[in-house]
Image: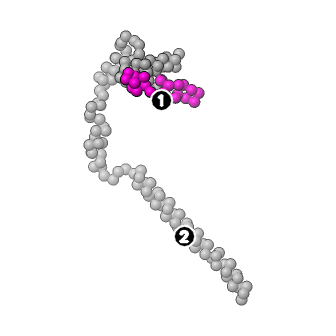
Amino acid sequence: AQARDSCNALLSPLEAMPRASNRLLVSALLCAGAFTVTHLAFVSAPASSSRQHSPVVLSARGGGEYDISDADIQNFYNSLLTGAGGDPPKGTVLSELVVKFFHGDFTPQGFKRYSGLWKGPPPGNIGKKDIAVGVAKLKEQMA
């Protein structure tokens, strides 16, 4: 009788294991299902189409002070082809792009943009001195 009780004591945890593993499996499946549902809801399309007509969406499509026509593009292109030469004037798109992409150091790891104080005038803003450095580095890269 004593041997049977010790065998039953050993079998009880083994009999309980399938129930515990079933609970673990069910809870894992529920967690995975909840995770999937929340992420599918996050990336799905918006439920209502009324949001597409909000003022923010309409202004993001254009129709404001930043409208650019083909004539504006042609004028910009013509302004690049004419002129007396030299560095681009301060405050233009071209000067800002030259400073952004060429004022810095070209290292073996890549381009490191200048992070100091712009020379100006006024100090702290991009000025003629900064544009001159950017144009010099641009010419260096083109050579």
Q: Which residue sits furthest right?
A: 3
Q: Which residue is mark 2?
A: 23
Q: Which residue is mark 1?
A: 115
**Residue 86 appears in the figure:** yes
Q: Name the foreground residue: 10 vs 90.
A: 90
Reply above or below: 128 against 18: above
Q: Position of residue 18 (x, y in %)?
A: 60, 72
- Label 2 crowding class (10 Å Cα cut-off): few <14, some 14-19, many 20+? few
Residue at point 47%, 24% (across, down): 103
User: Magenta-highlighted stretch: main secondary structure?
Assistant: loop
Q: Which residue sits furthest bottom?
A: 1
Mark 2 element type = helix
Q: Is residue 113 magenta?
A: yes
Residue at point 49%, 64% (across, down): 30
Magenta segment = 102-125
Reply above or below: 25 against 10: above
Q: Position of residue 137 (x, y in %)?
A: 49, 19
Name which quarter of the figure residue 66 lies in.
top left
Q: Quadrant of the N terminus?
A: bottom right
Mark 1 element type = loop
Residue at point 41%, 52% (across, down): 42
Q: Position of residue 25 (x, y in %)?
A: 55, 66
Dot 2 or dot 1: first in sequence order is 2
Q: Which residue sits furthest front?
A: 123
Q: Is residue 128 magenta?
A: no
Amino acid type, residue under disc 2 in the picture: Arg
Q: Name the foreground residue: 137 vs 80.
A: 137
Reply above or below: 48 against 85: below
Q: How many marks?
A: 2
